[in-house]
Image: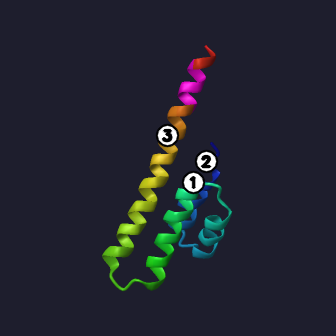
């Protein structure tokens, strides 16, 4: 699994680079990441209730964290398989 998309998503979110986050949403091959970004950007632009925006942002960040952890576990399992 390529972690570059997740790193970019974290970076763009941290830097509030919404245009780049939108481009990443379209280009990524991870459908769940794309959907989480879409939900967050929609809430950020159109939602008046800050708690909804915060909920969407938290969901995006949790998914990124989960995907990166899963990738690390898969790499560790693969390394042990070669020994």
Q: Position of residue 23 (x, y in %)?
A: 66, 70
Report which quarter residue 53 is drawn in: bottom left
Q: How crowded is mark 3: few (under 14 residues within 10 Å), some or many (20 or more)?
A: few
Q: Give percent across and percent down for residue 66.
A: 45, 47
x, y percent for residue 60: 45, 61
Element assignment for label 3: helix
Mark 3 / mark 2, whichever is N-terminal: 2
Cβ atoms under marks 1 and 3 closer than 8 Å: no
Position of 79 relative to 13 (above/below): above
Give me the residue at 59% from left, 25% from top. Answer: 78
Q: Which residue is labeled 2 in the image? A: 3
Q: How far apart are marks 1 and 2 (CA)?
A: 5 Å
Query: Where does label 1 land, which residue?
Result: 6
Question: Between 9 and 77, which is closer to the camera in this rendering?
Answer: 77
Contact between marks 1 and 2 (CB within 8 A): the answer is: yes
Name the residue at 64% across, 65% down. 24
Q: Which numbered dot is residue 70?
A: 3
Instruction: Tell me the SS state at disc 2.
Output: loop
Q: Quadrant of residue 19?
A: bottom right
Q: Tell me the magenta residue range.
A: 75-80
Q: Which of marks 1 and 3 is in front?
A: 3
Identify the residue at horizontal 57%, vertical 31% (top origin).
75
């Amino acid at each position: 699994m390529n972690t570059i998309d997740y790193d970019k998503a974290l970076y763009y979110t941290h830097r509030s680079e919404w245009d780049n986050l939108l481009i990443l949403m379209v280009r990524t091959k991870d459908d769940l990441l794309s959907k989480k970004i879409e939900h967050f950007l929609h809430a950020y632009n159109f939602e008046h209730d800050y708690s909804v925006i915060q909920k969407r942002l938290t969901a995006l960040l949790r998914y990124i964290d989960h995907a990166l952890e899963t990738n690390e576990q898969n790499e560790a399992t693969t390394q042990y398989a070669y020994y």
